[in-house]
């Protein structure tokens, strides 16, 4: 027979109502009593009936995440960080995929999550089809990108500040003496790629430098960075490149090396994400390190406050990242 709440109450020496209060996180239970109940739960391997609790309290203690299903480092790392943050907050994790991120497929993903029983939704990597994200959702939603216009519930945005981060990367190259900085962009229907391009342009404009033509658009893969950098390597005026992610930067490093362009002596390269391999490339890659754990924790804090109708955290929704300077950038030698 499975362990019941009555068994836990008997082992802890308390009433069944007290066990119920502890299991449901209710107040008015002393720390000593709460610890005794938790010890009994662990000893007896008691597992609360979440379905019954959901019917009683109107909550499932589960948060849904909508993802494009990308295998790239950033989205994958963010998903893992979200799951850990939800576990710490006492919520289970449910996942729904969408292939294109458009309104219709997002609505289908939301419907799938609602049938699983979720109290809120995180939209992990929204993409842009040229119109505002607008659809119905009956539970609160946090977007890790651009704002979402919901009917039926509240929404919020929590994200790294991609514009400021890209500006910082570009300013780093300009400060090393480069006259301008080229950019290998990510897919133009990704909000993150567009933010990084905007930050690159903003840094050049603030420095009074005309932005050079964009390199061919990449798809986040090393192969696309390699193809784009092969074209840039033909131009001797290209001395500094900001790449929209580290995987494309990896391909760019190979392309410049094959073309006889030394990094950083001839071309400085900055990536974005700080993938685990970045510190071990040849040369080690200067890059923007995103704090995925902080973004995930902040998103879950905001969403659970919306679910539980408690005050939202007061910190700003856009979170700064860190520029990690390594050997792929160096002061540009002066020419006579």
Image (cartoon, helix red, strand yellow):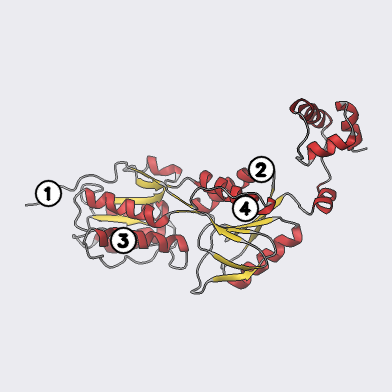
Vertically, is 19 above or below 58?
Answer: above
- How far apart marks 3 and 1 lie (CA) works out to 25 Å
The residue wearing badge 4 is 303
- How far apart marks 1 and 2 lie (CA) works out to 54 Å
Q: Position of residue 321 (x, y in %)?
A: 42, 47
- How far apart marks 1 and 4 lie (CA) works out to 52 Å
Query: What's the mark number on residue 87?
Result: 2
Q: Quadrant of the N terminus?
A: top right
Query: Helix, strand, or loop for circle 1?
Result: loop
Q: Residues within 10 Å of mark 1 (few under 14, many from 20)?
A: few
Q: Is residue 52 visible?
A: yes
Vertically, is 20 above or below 315?
Answer: above
- How far apart marks 4 and 3 lie (CA) works out to 32 Å
User: Which label sits in the foreground, 4 or 3?
Assistant: 4
Is 177 on the left or on the right of 299, as rendered? left
Q: Position of residue 201 (x, y in %)?
A: 31, 62
The residue wearing badge 3 is 202
Which image quarter: residue 219? bottom left
Query: What's the mark number on residue 334?
Result: 1
Which mark sits nearer the N-terminus, 1 or 2? 2
Is 300 on the left or on the right of 114, as rendered? left
Q: Nearer the viewer, residue 188 or 46?
A: 46
Vertically, is 3 above or below 227?
Answer: above
User: Which label sits in the foreground, 1 or 2?
Assistant: 2
Which mark sits nearer the N-terminus, 2 or 4? 2
User: Which label sits in the foreground, 3 or 1?
Assistant: 3
User: Which label sits in the foreground, 1 or 4?
Assistant: 4
Query: Helix, strand, or loop for circle 3?
Result: helix
Outermost residue to the left: 336
Query: Helix, strand, or loop for circle 4?
Result: helix
């Amino acid at each position: 027979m499975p362990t019941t709440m009555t068994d836990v109450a008997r082992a802890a020496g308390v009433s069944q109502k007290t066990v119920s209060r502890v299991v449901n996180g209710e107040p008015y239970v002393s720390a000593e009593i709460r610890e005794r109940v938790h010890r009994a739960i662990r000893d007896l391997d008691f597992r609360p009936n979440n379905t019954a609790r959901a019917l009683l309290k109107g909550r499932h203690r589960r948060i849904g995440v909508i993802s494009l299903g990308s295998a790239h480092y950033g989205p994958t790392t963010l998903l893992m960080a979200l799951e850990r943050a939800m576990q710490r907050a006492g919520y289970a994790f449910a996942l729904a995929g969408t292939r294109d991120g458009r309104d219709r497929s997002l609505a289908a993903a939301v419907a799938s999550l609602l049938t699983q029983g979720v109290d809120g939704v995180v939209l992990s990597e929204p993409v842009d089809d040229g119109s505002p994200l607008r659809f119905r959702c009956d539970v609160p939603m946090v977007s890790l990108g651009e704002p979402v216009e919901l009917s039926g519930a509240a929404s919020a945005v929590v994200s790294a500040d991609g514009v400021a981060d890209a500006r910082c990367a570009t300013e780093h190259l300009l400060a090393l003496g480069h006259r301008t900085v080229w950019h290998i962009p990510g897919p133009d229907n990704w909000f993150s790629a567009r933010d990084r391009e905007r930050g690159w342009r903003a840094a050049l404009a603030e420095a009074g430098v005309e932005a050079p033509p964009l390199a061919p658009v990449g798809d986040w893969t090393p192969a696309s960075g390699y193809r784009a950098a092969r074209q840039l390597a033909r131009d001797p005026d290209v001395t500094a490149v900001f790449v929209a992610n580290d995987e494309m930067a990896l391909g760019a490093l190979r392309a410049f090396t094959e073309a006889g362009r030394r990094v950083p002596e001839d071309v400085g390269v900055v990536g974005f994400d700080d993938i685990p391999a970045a510190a071990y490339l040849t040369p080690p890659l200067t890059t923007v390190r995103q704090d995925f754990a902080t973004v995930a924790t902040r998103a879950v804090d905001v969403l659970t406050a919306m679910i539980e109708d408690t005050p939202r955290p007061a910190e700003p929704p856009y979170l700064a990242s860190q520029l990690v300077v390594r050997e792929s950038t160096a002061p540009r030698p002066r020419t006579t």
